[in-house]
Image: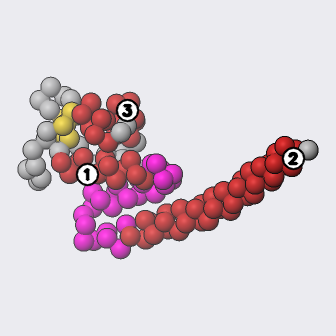
Amino acid sequence: MDDEVAKYTTQEISVLVGMSVSQVHYYYRLGLIPNLRRSENGYRVFTEKNLIWMKNLKIFIDSEMPLKDIRQLTDLVVQGKQATAEKRQAIVEHHLKELEKKQAELKKQVAFMNGFIKTYQQMEKESDER
Protein backbone atom coordinates (compact mmCIF):
# COMPACT_ATOMS: atom_id res chain seq x y z
CA MET A 1 0.00 0.00 0.00
CA ASP A 2 1.17 3.51 -0.78
CA ASP A 3 2.21 5.24 2.43
CA GLU A 4 2.46 8.69 0.89
CA VAL A 5 1.00 11.41 3.07
CA ALA A 6 -2.27 12.96 1.96
CA LYS A 7 -1.84 16.69 2.16
CA TYR A 8 -4.24 18.46 -0.21
CA THR A 9 -7.96 19.07 0.06
CA THR A 10 -10.26 19.11 -2.94
CA GLN A 11 -10.30 22.92 -2.78
CA GLU A 12 -6.49 23.09 -2.78
CA ILE A 13 -6.24 20.63 -5.67
CA SER A 14 -8.78 22.61 -7.68
CA VAL A 15 -6.64 25.75 -7.32
CA LEU A 16 -3.34 23.97 -8.03
CA VAL A 17 -4.68 22.21 -11.11
CA GLY A 18 -7.01 24.89 -12.46
CA MET A 19 -10.29 23.01 -12.18
CA SER A 20 -13.38 23.90 -10.25
CA VAL A 21 -14.23 21.82 -7.20
CA SER A 22 -17.30 20.51 -9.04
CA GLN A 23 -15.08 19.39 -11.94
CA VAL A 24 -12.82 17.50 -9.52
CA HIS A 25 -15.90 15.80 -8.04
CA TYR A 26 -17.22 15.02 -11.53
CA TYR A 27 -13.99 13.38 -12.69
CA TYR A 28 -13.83 11.47 -9.41
CA ARG A 29 -17.37 10.13 -9.97
CA LEU A 30 -16.32 9.07 -13.48
CA GLY A 31 -13.50 7.05 -11.93
CA LEU A 32 -10.76 9.17 -13.49
CA ILE A 33 -8.90 9.90 -10.25
CA PRO A 34 -7.25 6.68 -9.07
CA ASN A 35 -6.02 5.85 -5.59
CA LEU A 36 -7.82 8.70 -3.90
CA ARG A 37 -8.20 8.51 -0.14
CA ARG A 38 -10.65 9.91 2.33
CA SER A 39 -9.87 11.52 5.66
CA GLU A 40 -11.32 10.28 8.93
CA ASN A 41 -14.09 12.84 8.37
CA GLY A 42 -14.89 11.40 4.95
CA TYR A 43 -13.37 14.22 2.90
CA ARG A 44 -11.35 13.46 -0.20
CA VAL A 45 -7.64 14.02 0.39
CA PHE A 46 -4.93 14.09 -2.25
CA THR A 47 -1.29 13.02 -2.15
CA GLU A 48 1.56 14.42 -4.22
CA LYS A 49 1.03 11.54 -6.68
CA ASN A 50 -2.65 12.46 -6.94
CA LEU A 51 -1.61 16.06 -7.67
CA ILE A 52 0.67 14.92 -10.50
CA TRP A 53 -2.12 12.75 -11.92
CA MET A 54 -4.60 15.63 -11.67
CA LYS A 55 -2.24 17.89 -13.63
CA ASN A 56 -1.95 15.18 -16.29
CA LEU A 57 -5.72 14.71 -16.29
CA LYS A 58 -6.20 18.45 -16.85
CA ILE A 59 -3.88 18.33 -19.87
CA PHE A 60 -5.71 15.31 -21.29
CA ILE A 61 -9.04 17.08 -20.85
CA ASP A 62 -7.81 20.42 -22.20
CA SER A 63 -6.39 18.67 -25.27
CA GLU A 64 -9.81 17.09 -25.85
CA MET A 65 -8.69 13.51 -25.31
CA PRO A 66 -11.86 11.40 -25.36
CA LEU A 67 -13.08 10.42 -21.89
CA LYS A 68 -13.04 6.75 -22.90
CA ASP A 69 -9.29 7.04 -23.57
CA ILE A 70 -8.70 8.86 -20.30
CA ARG A 71 -10.69 6.14 -18.56
CA GLN A 72 -8.55 3.47 -20.21
CA LEU A 73 -5.37 5.30 -19.15
CA THR A 74 -6.69 5.55 -15.60
CA ASP A 75 -7.44 1.83 -15.50
CA LEU A 76 -3.95 1.08 -16.79
CA VAL A 77 -2.37 3.35 -14.17
CA VAL A 78 -4.14 1.39 -11.46
CA GLN A 79 -2.76 -1.86 -12.90
CA GLY A 80 0.83 -0.65 -12.58
CA LYS A 81 3.58 0.97 -14.58
CA GLN A 82 5.61 -1.89 -15.99
CA ALA A 83 2.79 -4.09 -17.20
CA THR A 84 0.92 -1.33 -18.98
CA ALA A 85 3.54 1.14 -20.22
CA GLU A 86 3.25 0.02 -23.85
CA LYS A 87 -0.54 0.27 -23.85
CA ARG A 88 -0.46 3.70 -22.22
CA GLN A 89 2.10 4.88 -24.74
CA ALA A 90 -0.12 3.69 -27.60
CA ILE A 91 -3.09 5.67 -26.25
CA VAL A 92 -1.03 8.83 -25.87
CA GLU A 93 0.60 8.40 -29.30
CA HIS A 94 -2.82 8.02 -30.92
CA HIS A 95 -4.03 11.19 -29.22
CA LEU A 96 -0.87 13.02 -30.28
CA LYS A 97 -1.57 12.09 -33.91
CA GLU A 98 -5.09 13.47 -33.56
CA LEU A 99 -3.72 16.69 -32.09
CA GLU A 100 -1.23 17.01 -34.94
CA LYS A 101 -4.09 16.65 -37.44
CA LYS A 102 -6.02 19.38 -35.64
CA GLN A 103 -2.91 21.55 -35.56
CA ALA A 104 -2.43 21.18 -39.32
CA GLU A 105 -6.08 22.08 -39.90
CA LEU A 106 -5.77 25.10 -37.62
CA LYS A 107 -2.69 26.27 -39.54
CA LYS A 108 -4.73 26.15 -42.75
CA GLN A 109 -7.53 28.11 -41.10
CA VAL A 110 -5.10 30.72 -39.77
CA ALA A 111 -3.57 31.14 -43.23
CA PHE A 112 -7.05 31.48 -44.70
CA MET A 113 -8.03 34.16 -42.15
CA ASN A 114 -4.77 36.01 -42.75
CA GLY A 115 -5.64 36.03 -46.45
CA PHE A 116 -9.00 37.61 -45.65
CA ILE A 117 -7.34 40.25 -43.50
CA LYS A 118 -4.87 41.11 -46.27
CA THR A 119 -7.72 41.36 -48.77
CA TYR A 120 -9.68 43.66 -46.47
CA GLN A 121 -6.61 45.78 -45.76
CA GLN A 122 -6.00 46.12 -49.48
CA MET A 123 -9.64 47.10 -50.04
CA GLU A 124 -9.38 49.71 -47.31
CA LYS A 125 -6.12 51.04 -48.73
CA GLU A 126 -7.66 51.35 -52.21
CA SER A 127 -10.70 53.07 -50.71
CA ASP A 128 -8.49 55.61 -48.92
CA GLU A 129 -6.62 56.37 -52.15
CA ARG A 130 -9.81 57.48 -53.91
Mark 1 or mark 2: whose residue is earlier in sequence = 1
Q: Which residue is mark 3?
A: 20
Q: Residues within 10 Å of mark 1 (few under 14, many from 20)?
A: few
- Please, is residue 122 above or below residue 82 in the view? above
Q: Residue at x 27, y 57 (%)?
A: 78
**Label 3 sits on what residue type?**
Ser
Q: Residue at x 24, y 34 (%)?
A: 12
Q: CA distance from mark 1 to mark 3?
A: 17 Å
Q: CA distance from mark 3 to mark 2?
A: 53 Å
Disc marking residue 52: 1
Where does the C terminus fall, quadrant-wise?
A: top right
- Please, is residue 101 above or below residue 1 in the view? below
**Label 2 sits on what residue type?**
Glu
Callout 2: helix, strand or loop?
Answer: helix
Disc marking residue 129: 2
Q: What segment is highlighted magenta in the picture?
A: 61-88
Farthest-out residue, front: 129
Q: Nearer the viewer, residue 71 or 7?
A: 7
Farthest-out residue, right: 130
Select label 3 or label 2 by which is in front.
Answer: 2
Work out whether residue 115 can be spotted.
Answer: yes
Q: Position of residue 94 (x, y in %)?
A: 50, 68
- Give the prevailing secondary structure in the magenta stretch: helix
Mark 1 or mark 3: whose residue is earlier in sequence = 3
Q: Residue at x 20, y 51 (%)?
A: 49
Q: CA distance from mark 1 to mark 2?
A: 59 Å
Callout 3: helix, strand or loop?
Answer: loop
Q: Residues within 10 Å of mark 3 (few under 14, many from 20)?
A: some
Asked whether residue 26 is drawn in magenta, I would say no
Q: Residue at x 82, y 45 (%)?
A: 124
